[in-house]
Image: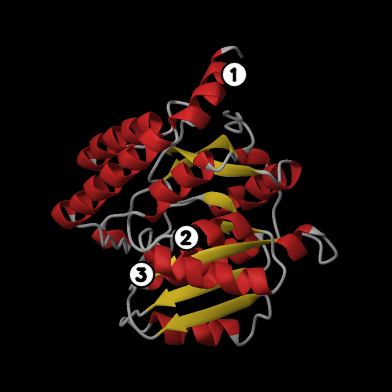
Amino acid sequence: MTVDISQRLAHTARGEPDCGSPARQTHLVLIPSYNSGPKLIETVKSARQHWAPVWVVIDGSTDGSAEALSDLAATDPDLRVFVLPRNQGKGAAVLHGLKLAHEEGFTHALTMDADGQHPAPLIPTFITQSRANPDALILGLPIFDSSAPRIRVIWRKLSNWCTSLETLWVCNFDSLFGFRVYPIGALCRIMEASRWMRRFDFDAEAAVRLCWSGFRLINMPAPVRYYSADQGGVSHFRYLRDNLLLSWMHTRLVLGFVGRLPSLLPRRVRSSRH
């Protein structure tokens, strides 16, 4: 399912939600970060302009960003910073934040990258969609501009084809775009039952396994911008290492998919009738 929000960008509500808004008690923004540099501060400030609370998990960074962000959080009660002693990977950082959020009674978390690529003005729109569909996973569908590296777009299309196969085309989504609203309890259970999903393989596998669990997926278009090094952009993607990681991820998901065919086939038949 895809929701057309391309005309809403210019009309997105500015500022934070009302302090009495129930959404503040159920939904938070969660940002994992590893050596994101100055872009982290920009990203957090932008997220805070559009939502509260915002939580950041510093994944063993060594660039001084933890100290800078902690200074910012000291004057902002709606910003919380958690610092992991060593780098464990994006998925591990997200899981750390999810567990803490679950303990405090939050039901959903919007995840976004720390490098400024994701559209903070769309945070309220995504969360509004999540509150209207609490049993669904709200997924960003990236709209690329000329800043997107061509090789990254090509590999993304291949990964997307794989995840479509692994869900028998019941759930079609962008497998690597991390601007999403997750149901916290369900995702924690799935991740804690697996030894994987702790690094770059997190985004794709989380969505596939939530689809296998019966969650609906709602796609919402969102512009993405890649920053050059001169613009402060930071990328930790390593083509050989991370593509090998994704290859292993898709291998185990295909193996898991075979055993789930009896439950996926009826869903595929129902979806083809609509």
Which residue type carries mark 1?
A: Arg
Q: Earlier in the sequence, mark 1 or mark 3?
A: 3
Image quarter for residue 266? top right
| Residue matched to label 2 | 191
- In the rendered image, residue 272, in percent from the top left (x then y), is placed at 54, 14
Left/right of residue 16 with respect to residue 19 in the rendered view:
left
Mark 1 or mark 2: which comes first in sequence? 2
Task: Determine which quarter of the picture holds residue 108.
Answer: bottom right
Q: In the rendered view of the protein, which quadrant contains the C terminus?
A: top right
Q: Is residue 34 left or right of residue 135?
A: left
Q: Amino acid at mark 3?
A: Ser
Q: Pick out the residue farthest to the right.
A: 20
- Total numbered circles: 3
For disc 1, the neighbor class at 10 Å (few under 14, some 14 to 19, many from 20) is few
Q: Tell me which residue sits at (24%, 49%) in the image.
A: 248
Q: Quadrant of residue 232?
A: bottom left
Q: Is residue 72 above or below residue 163?
A: below
Task: State the separation of the CA atoms marked 2 and 3.
Answer: 25 Å
- Mark closest to the chain's N terminus, 2 or 3: 3
Of residues 139 and 264, the one nearer the viewer is 264
The residue that mark 1 highlights is 270
Give coordinates of residue 227: x percent, y percent: 32, 54
Residue 6 position in % (x across, y down)? 57, 32
Q: Is residue 42 visible?
A: no
Which residue occupies the foreground of this view, 255 or 10?
A: 255
- Judge depth for marks 1 and 3 and give the one in front: 1
**Disc assigned to residue 36:** 3
Q: Residue at x 34, y 79 (%)?
A: 61
- Please report contact status of discs 1 and 3: CB closer than 8 Å, yes or no: no
- Cα distance in 3D space between marks 1 and 3: 44 Å
Q: Secondary structure at mark 1?
A: helix
Q: Decide which of 130, 233 is in the foreground and name it.
A: 130
